[in-house]
């Protein structure tokens, strides 16, 4: 089976669709709930009923909101099962266009986007000794950027770009 360009880009940046299966609780007033992920593709919602789960007619949108027809009773559980990814199909298509319809160019565009997001990374410590460090992601993204950039340059050299012409001149 041959992968599409979008699938190849996703594979290179490790953006495979991921399954979430989480339980949340209603507050008796809200009909819509924000989920922790966006770019939701397939989804189902269930409410707690008679010791099990009963399907609902809830709707999901790509932004990560699940909406029910009526409010979920206070402290009543509901289960959501959905598939999500970091980038939407439209974003992957944009990366392909911006990357010159090259897989490595699209991967490079995706990593640039993630690097900008890395500004939000943090490191902290609590008085009880608990620490959190999410700053390592920037170094990993920088390594990926360099890798894809080098591969893109090698592709260009192999294609007869000015790099190869200039390198062979004496």
Image (cartoon, rainbow, N blue to C red):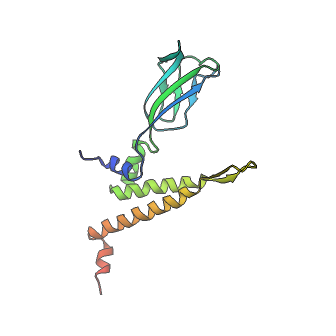
98 horizontally vs 56: left or right? left
**Which quadrant: the C terminus?**
bottom left
Occupied quadrant, residue 133:
bottom right
x, y percent for residue 27: 65, 22
Query: How many marks are shown on the rendered structure?
Result: 0
State whether residue 164 is above or below residue 116: below
Foreground pick, 123 / 33: 123
x%, y% of residue 15?
42, 47
Q: Residue at x 44, y 29 (%)?
A: 43
Q: Is residue 131 left or right of residue 80?
A: right
Q: Position of residue 1 (x, y in %)?
A: 23, 44
Residue 157 image point, x, y percent? 30, 70
The residue at the point 36 percent across, 58 percent down is: 104
Is residue 99 visible in the rendered image? The answer is: no
Residue 84 is left or right of residue 104, and the answer is right
Q: Residue at x 38, y 48 (%)?
A: 10
Residue 72, compared with residue 96, is above or below; it is above
Asked where in the image residue 30 lies, by quadrant, the reply is top right
């Amino acid at each position: 089976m041959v992968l599409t360009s979008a699938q190849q880009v996703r594979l290179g940046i490790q953006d495979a669709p991921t399954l979430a299966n989480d339980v949340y609780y209603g507050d008796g007033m809200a009909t819509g709930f924000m989920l922790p992920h966006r770019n939701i593709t397939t989804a189902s919602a269930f409410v707690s009923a008679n010791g099990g789960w009963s399907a609902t007619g809830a709707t999901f949108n790509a932004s990560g909101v699940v909406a029910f027809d009526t409010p979920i009773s206070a402290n009543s559980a509901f289960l959501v099962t959905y598939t999500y990814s970091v980038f939407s199909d439209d974003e992957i298509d944009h990366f392909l266009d911006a990357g010159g319809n090259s897989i490595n160019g699209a991967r490079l565009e995706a990593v640039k986007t993630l690097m900008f997001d890395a500004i939000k990374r943090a490191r902290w410590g609590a008085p009880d000794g608990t620490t959190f460090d999410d700053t390592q992601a920037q170094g990993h993204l920088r390594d990926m950027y360099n890798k894809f950039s080098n591969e893109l340059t090698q592709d260009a050299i192999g294609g007869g770009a000015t790099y190869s012409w200039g390198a062979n001149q004496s």
